[in-house]
Amino acid sequence: MRRILWFRRDLRVEDNPLLSQEGNVLPIFIFDTDILEKLSANDRRVSFIFNALIRLKENLKIRGLDLALFYGKPTEVFQWFLAQESHYDICASGDYDPYARERDREVSHILPFTYLHDTYIFKPDEVLKNDGSPYLVFTPYYNRAKAVFRPEHMAESMAVPQSLIPFDYKDIHRIKGDTHTKVPLSLTSIGFFEQSLLPHQLLHPEDKLKQFASKLGTYPHDRDFMALNATSRLSTDLRFGTISIRAVIRWLVEQKKLGVDTEPFFRQLIFREFYAMLLAHFPRLVDQNFRYPFRGVDNNDYFEAFCTACTGVPIVDAGIRELLESGEMHNRVRMICASFFTKNLLLPWQWGERFFAEHLMDYDAASNILSWQWSAGTGVDPQPYFRIFNPYTQSAKFDKEGLYIKKYLPDSGCEYPKPIVDHKQSSKRALEYFKNTFST
């Protein structure tokens, strides 16, 4: 059997189902132009991915394998393989957002395609109500997930002997239509510039787990305090699969044996599962509300102020500065910013979601989209439009000494000398707007 092992959101050799497939194999990664052409040439994520791919190539070579890199549309890449008159099957780990599912459907019409489960703990149809419908509320989903969870859900995928198919693994193969060219193995060959990543962004995920071990016990309390280094910092690694979700679960089991309360962190991992399940069952949520008609009020001036950290609200502007400077944003700050965006500014959540999608290192379609709908009050929650975070009380509670704000907002170069909206007045306006919209 000649198998193409298509690496995507699983950029590692440890605990990877692709390496448990026997036979003659051709490991590949595709720089998908349908995605890359929408990105800035300075996108940090592409640097992160490229570094991960170089490490993956080296680790595969240790196993007697290698990694061929392609640049182009996936359908055209596999059409090119088909034209080589050499039979291949494709193996790839499942990805369940609407773009990925449509891409894989098209690819499956070109060559035989086999899904391997890897990216999440559960498959989209694995944690459902008794009647087979998806949960819309997290807590019942969480309880069901714990009941469904079995040791098999964290079982390690063991590598088996595989024979490498001869190929040119040195260069990047550019495929456009029927044209095949080769370019040197570098970021500039695909139109991107190497970005400086922060030290912890370059840290191996297993080292992150070692550092997190000393913080896990205080995680439930400390995770909300923006100035503290209290989280795992694994979200980007889980997004691109430089560590497997199963490895993280196995690590939690070992921590639990040591007497550490692992439930709060495990709960956050299940939130990731919940959002992935929802987007898989309701693909229209990519840009549509779940049930409510409100879509926001277009205001380009407000949007520009938000995206340039010039709202005049310190915690919001500090959060945007963190995002623009590092590609990261503390989770509590994400909620504050999204609430301010959708409630105080009444901007369409889709605008904010796209802005985050442009900059977040750990951007995951399901988590980002569903989180923005939660903040906007238009998602699966039954009546959440009353939820409006007060950015001032939030920063007073979770950044009491202003350390986070001082770090990312040491000065103010904005043209707004004061907040662009008053919190009390804009909150009242939002409640009236939502109430009137939902009652019509």
Image (tube, rainbow, N blue to C red):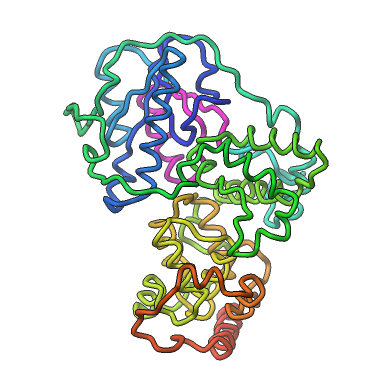
Left/right placement of residue 231 relative to residue 366 reads: right
Residue drawn at the location 36% of the way across and 81% of the way down:
414
Residue drawn at the location 69% of the way across and 46% of the way down:
214
- In the rendered image of this protein, does residue 308 appear above or below residue 429? above
Q: Toward the viewer: 182 or 75?
A: 182
Q: How many marks?
A: 0
Q: Toward the viewer: 119 or 128?
A: 119
Left/right placement of residue 153 relative to residue 226 reads: right
Residue at the extreme bottom of the image, as rendered: 425
Q: Quadrant of residue 126?
A: top right
Find residue 6 and report its horizontal and vertical position in percent. Answer: 42, 27
Q: Toward the viewer: 251 or 148?
A: 251
Q: Toward the viewer: 386 or 162?
A: 162
- In the rendered image of this protein, does residue 426 appear above or below residue 203? below
Find residue 144 and report its horizontal and vertical position in percent. Answer: 77, 45
Left/right placement of residue 390 relative to residue 45 reads: right
Magenta segment, which residues?
A: 91-119
Give the quarter of the figure containing the N terminus: top left
Residue 98 included in the magenta stretch of the image: yes
Residue drawn at the location 44% of the way across and 61% of the way down:
323
Q: Quadrant of residue 185?
A: top left
Q: In which quarter of the image is residue 154?
A: top right
- In the rendered image of this protein, does residue 184 appear above or below residue 20? below
Residue 391 included in the magenta stretch of the image: no
Find residue 330 and report its horizontal and vertical position in percent. Answer: 55, 61
Give the quarter of the figure containing the C terminus: bottom right
Left/right placement of residue 131 relative to residue 23 reads: right
